[in-house]
């Protein structure tokens, strides 16, 4: 299910992507999720797009790094800030395969990300409307949000990952 919250200001500033571009960027995030899975991580990936170009890629690395903040979105935001030389990513859009958690929602707001596109919803800890809505809390930046982009392909690797995990135990 696609859902979108649009404020007038963001609408003016927003970059219009074609359906093909949206799919392409989410496919690139999915490629990061596959790389994470090869490393034995939960398959979640992200990319950040500025002026129509991917400037940062991130993947879940919590097991390898043993870092609780090792989520795909944090990884991508760090790279994008490094790449642009600025903590303000207000002309950047973030594509992530799974609905962000509370920590990542906070980081997305702090980084002033313009538009968040996510794939699968996360009923347990998704904070863009599923388990809660961190983006609706008072903040001095409004993030545009579109969920459900390639939701099936984004959710499948996660479902099979946890299925395999359950079967092993
Ligand atoms: Zn997260």
Image (cartoon, rainbow, N blue to C red):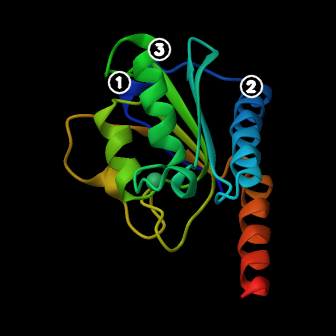
Label 3 element class:
helix
Where residue 40 sits in the image (x, y, percent)? 70, 58
Q: Is residue 134 left or right of residue 51?
A: left
Task: State the CA–CA distance, disc 2 to disc 1.
Answer: 23 Å
Relative side of 89 to 164, left or right: left
Mark-to-mark CA distance, 3 and 1: 26 Å
* Circle 1 residues within 10 Å: few <14, some 14–19, many ≥20: few
**Do residues under tags 2 and 1 come within 8 Å of each other at their CB atoms?**
no
For the residue labelled by badge 1, is the local secondary structure a helix, a strand or a loop? helix
**Mark 3 Cα-neighbour bin, 10 Å: few <14, some 14–19, many ≥20:** few
Residue at label 1?
A: 9
Q: CA distance from mark 3 to mark 2?
A: 22 Å
As drawn, 99 above or below 106 = below
Residue 80 visible somewhere in the drawing: yes
Residue carrying label 2: 21
Closer-to-camera residue (115/95): 95
Q: Is residue 155 above or below residue 80?
A: below
User: From the viewer's perspective, is the residue at label 2 or at label 1 nearer?
Assistant: 2
- Which element carries disc 2, helix, strand or loop? helix
Mark 3 sits on what residue?
83
16 relative to 127 in the view: left or right: right
* Number of dots carrying numbers: 3
Looking at marks 3 and 2 on the same chain, the residue that comes earlier in the sequence is marked by 2
* Marks 2 and 1, the one that precedes in the sequence: 1
Q: Quadrant of the C terminus?
A: bottom right
Q: Residue at x 69, y 46 (%)?
A: 149
Of residue 143 and residue 109, the one placed in the foreground of this image is 109
The percent coordinates of residue 81 (x first, y second) are: 40, 21
Instruction: Quadrant for residue 142, please give it.
Output: top left
The answer to which of marks 3 and 1 sits earlier in the sequence is 1
């Amino acid at each position: 299910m696609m859902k979108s919250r649009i404020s007038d200001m963001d609408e003016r500033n927003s970059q219009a992507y074609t359906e093909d571009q949206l799919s392409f960027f989410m496919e690139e995030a999915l490629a990061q999720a596959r790389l994470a899975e090869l490393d034995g991580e939960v398959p979640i990936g992200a990319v950040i797009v500025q002026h129509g170009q991917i400037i940062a890629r991130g993947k879940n690395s919590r097991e390898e790094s043993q870092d609780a903040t090792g989520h795909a979105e944090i990884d991508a935001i760090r790279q994008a800030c490094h790449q642009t030389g600025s903590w303000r990513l207000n002309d950047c859009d973030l594509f992530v395969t799974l609905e962000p958690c509370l920590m990542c929602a906070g980081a997305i707001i702090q980084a002033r990300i313009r538009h968040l596109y996510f794939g699968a919803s996360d009923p347990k800890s998704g904070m863009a409307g599923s388990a809660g809505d961190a983006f609706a809390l008072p903040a001095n930046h409004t993030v545009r949000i579109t969920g459900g982009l390639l939701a099936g392909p984004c959710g499948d690797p996660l479902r099979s990952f946890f299925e395999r995990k359950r079967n092993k135990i």
